[in-house]
């Protein structure tokens, strides 16, 4: 159902899904497959979430575009799914089986006539930080969120909509797609069940002062590495040092960067070890002779994923160092980085110099800062406790840290729970 800005002020469906990442998309698709109507609400201009910003999945090492393309096609063709982007839930009232939800729609300033031709961006004189690339580059003030954006439509950063320079974009659009006077709108949705799938954010690495993120340019995080390695990223897939754009001969991956530490993030996210090994393959593909160091407390690669770990160990230039990095400093003159750690197997204090460092930061649920409605129970870390709270069902990383495969499984289960809530009505 290709309708992103409802004309009516009140809409209805069997299930409301909040969050348009892989968990929300999966929940919506699986619910629609049994003939139930779904409203899928996403606060950003496009569906896709964190997965859309990944370079590859593990262990198959395939790009997310393949799975995303199928999901978007299923959503686009389904008569049971209604997508609302730039939409946020403001209030929820009622009880299980009979909810009334207030949804605020922020204007896109670009209407359904947009063909994503890009002529507006060519004449735009205003630049903004590209949040999709974690601020590593810039876009124009009118932009397409990413290469697989759905809806495939440009959007204007609201900070610049009243800037007189935006009129050039209006004049450049031969389809009349740009409306600078669009206004916010509030609608009401009547639904039987609510699924909360608002996703996660990376732990703020600037809080871990001893590891140098934000202080040394060649210290980056795992999510930034995904964007650097992506062909549609800020460097077009060229993995180079941020400080001087030089090629890489050595790299260090620091596991549990802030995780499993009561001072920062007390829990383990469970996927970081495999994610770092996956990123090590990015380096190996581009730099066959580079030395790769992975500093770890213990490697967590459950089940069949252990095969991936064993394969990594067969690489003679892949060095696994058991020990948590205590401090990172910059080498004068070269901007290389020195990692100080204790080898917990030998008790030896080590110093290892590399050209770039990737911090494996953990996953923090967005429910920590923006909890779901109706007193849905959360644990001490912000995860939904049992997936239900007066009919509100959790999905994906609102429940616990998950990789993509586990997220899809959990979201399928969430769809079934929501269907059962509606059935009890």
Image (cartoon, helix red, strand yellow):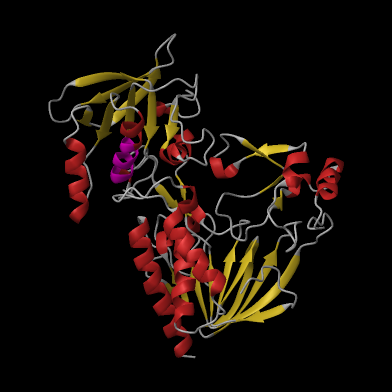
Report the side of 263 relative to 43 (left or right): left
Which range of residues does the magenta coloring cover? 273-281
Image x and y of residue 199, in percent:
47, 57
Position above or below: 97 against 271: below
Please state which of residues 81 and 199 is positioned toward the viewer in this rendering: 81
Report the side of 217 relative to 338 (left or right): right
Residue 277 falls within the magenta-colored stretch: yes
> In this orientation, does residue 70 appear?
yes
Image x and y of residue 143, in percent:
68, 47
Position above or below: 425 against 340: below
Please state which of residues 56 and 105 is positioned toward the viewer in this rendering: 56
Most distant residue in the left direction: 346
Report the side of 233 relative to 335 (left or right): right
Residue 112 falls within the magenta-colored stretch: no
Please state which of residues 205 and 172 is positioned toward the viewer in this rendering: 172
Image x and y of residue 219, in percent:
43, 27
Most distant residue in the top direction: 333
> In this orientation, does residue 383 appear?
no
Image x and y of residue 77, in percent:
55, 73
Position above or below: 207 against 365: above
Position above or below: 252 against 61: above
Image quarter (top left, top right, bottom left or bottom right) of the N terminus: bottom right
Q: Which residue is at a point 43% across and 61% down the rendered structure image?
A: 398
- The dominant secondary structure in magenta is helix
Number of residue marks: 0
Q: Which residue is at a point 46% across and 31% down the rendered structure image?
A: 238
Q: Which residue is at a point 29% across and 40% down the rendered structure image?
A: 277
């Amino acid at each position: 159902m290709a309708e992103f800005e409802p004309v009516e002020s009140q809409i209805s469906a069997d299930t409301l899904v909040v969050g348009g990442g892989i968990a929300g998309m999966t929940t919506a698709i699986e619910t629609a497959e049994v003939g139930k109507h779904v409203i899928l609400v996403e606060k950003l201009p496009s569906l896709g979430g964190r997965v859309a910003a990944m370079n590859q999945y593990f262990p198959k090492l395939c790009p997310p575009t393949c799975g995303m393309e199928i999901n978007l096609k299923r959503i686009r063709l389904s008569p049971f799914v209604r997508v609302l982007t730039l939409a946020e839930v403001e209030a929820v009232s009622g009880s299980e089986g009979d909810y009334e939800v207030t949804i605020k729609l922020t204007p896109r300033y670009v209407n359904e006539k947009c063909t994503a031709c890009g002529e507006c961006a060519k004449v735009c004189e205003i630049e903004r930080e590209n949040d999709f690339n974690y601020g590593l580059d810039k876009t124009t003030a009118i932009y397409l969120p990413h290469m697989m954006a759905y809806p495939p439509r440009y959007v204007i950063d609201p900070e610049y909509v009243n800037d007189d320079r935006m009129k050039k974009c209006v004049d450049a659009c031969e389809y009349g797609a740009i409306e600078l006077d669009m206004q916010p709108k509030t609608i009401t949705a009547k639904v039987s069940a609510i699924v909360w799938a608002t996703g996660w954010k990376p732990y703020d690495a600037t809080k871990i002062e001893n590891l140098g993120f934000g202080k040394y340019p060649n210290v980056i995080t795992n999510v930034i590495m995904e964007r650097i390695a992506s062909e549609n990223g800020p460097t077009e897939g060229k993995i180079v040092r941020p400080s001087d754009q030089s090629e890489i001969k050595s790299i260090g991956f620091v596991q549990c960067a802030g995780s499993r530490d009561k001072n920062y993030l007390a829990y383990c996210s469970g996927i970081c070890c495999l994610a770092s090994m996956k990123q090590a393959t990015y380096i190996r593909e581009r730099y066959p002779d580079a030395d790769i160091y992975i500093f770890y407390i213990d490697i967590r690669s459950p089940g069949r994923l252990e095969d991936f770990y064993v394969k990594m160990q067969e690489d003679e230039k892949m060095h696994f160092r058991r020990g948590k990095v205590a401090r990172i400093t910059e080498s004068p003159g070269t901007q290389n980085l020195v990692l100080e750690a204790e080898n917990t197997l030998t008790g030896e204090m080590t110093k290892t110099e590399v050209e770039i460092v990737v911090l494996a930061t953990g996953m923090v649920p967005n429910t920590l800062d923006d909890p779901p409605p109706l007193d849905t129970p959360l644990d001490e870390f912000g995860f939904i406790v049992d997936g239900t709270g007066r009919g509100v069902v959790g999905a994906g990383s609102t429940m616990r840290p998950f990789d993509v495969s586990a997220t899809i499984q959990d979201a399928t289960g969430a769809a079934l729970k929501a269907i059962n809530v509606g059935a009890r009505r």
